[in-house]
Amino acid sequence: MRRFFIAAAFLPLCLMVAGCAMGKKEWPSVQQSEDRFTLKLVEGVRRDNCLLLDVAVNGAANRLWRVSIQYEAVGTEEGQGCSGCPFVPREAKEFTRERRDFNLQDSILKLSLCGLEPGVEYRFRVVGTSELPAMPLESTDVYESLP
């Protein structure tokens, strides 16, 4: 009789534990349509030794966490790229959402890059990183800034 009570108490417990472990379990995944953004250069102006950029952020602008301006000088000197060669960014300036110079108004991100050498041509692109690690990097096309 005692064994019957132990089995009667143990069987529902086993069924309850087994029922909790059943079912499909997955980590939450990124919803590409809801969490993706794109970047497009709207305006780029070079003033003195600064490059001032307005970048349109379309889609989930709230997911944009970090942006970098990747750039290279173009010329014949050591460490400069050539105008017909593939773009190889030699330097980058980072902007994160917590910083004061990360200026996102509505869907326009205003960025500035100063310290450019006068009289030197530069090639650049803007690359954005999502706050979700599974999302790919998003970047603009490569543009030229004439001196």
Image (cartoon, rainbow, N blue to C red):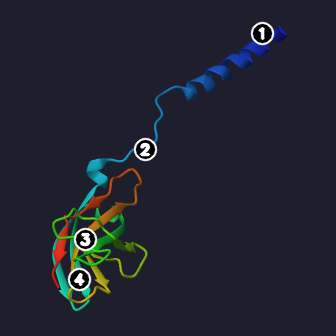
Q: Residue at 32%, 74% (x, y): give it.
A: 79
Q: Which mark is first along the chain, 1 or 3?
A: 1
Residue wearing tag 2: 28
Local packing at callout 1 (Cα closer than 10 Å; few below 14, some 14-19, many 20+) is few
Residue wearing tag 1: 4
Residue 111, how many percent across, how many down?
28, 79
State the SS at label 2.
loop
Q: CA distance from mark 1 to mark 2?
A: 44 Å
Residue wearing tag 4: 52
Q: Which mark is first along the chain, 2 or 1?
A: 1
Q: Which mark is first along the chain, 4 or 2?
A: 2
Q: Horizontally, is 75 left or right of 63 in the view?
A: left
Q: Quadrant of residue 84?
A: bottom left
| Nearest to the observer: residue 61 or residue 129 | 129
Q: What label sits on residue 81 in the rendered view?
A: 3
Q: CA distance from mark 2 to mark 3?
A: 43 Å
Q: CA distance from mark 3 to mark 4?
A: 22 Å
Q: Which mark is first along the chain, 4 or 3?
A: 4
Q: CA distance from mark 2 to mark 4?
A: 38 Å
| Nearest to the observer: residue 112 or residue 123 | 123
Q: Which mark is first along the chain, 3 or 2?
A: 2
Q: CA distance from mark 1 to mark 4?
A: 81 Å
Q: Amino acid at mark 1?
A: Phe
Q: What label sits on residue 40 in the rendered view?
A: none
Front disc: 3 or 1: 3
State the SS at label 1.
helix
Q: Amino acid at mark 4?
A: Leu
Q: CA distance from mark 3 to mark 1?
A: 84 Å
Local packing at callout 4 (Cα closer than 10 Å; few below 14, some 14-19, many 20+) is some
State the SS at label 4.
strand
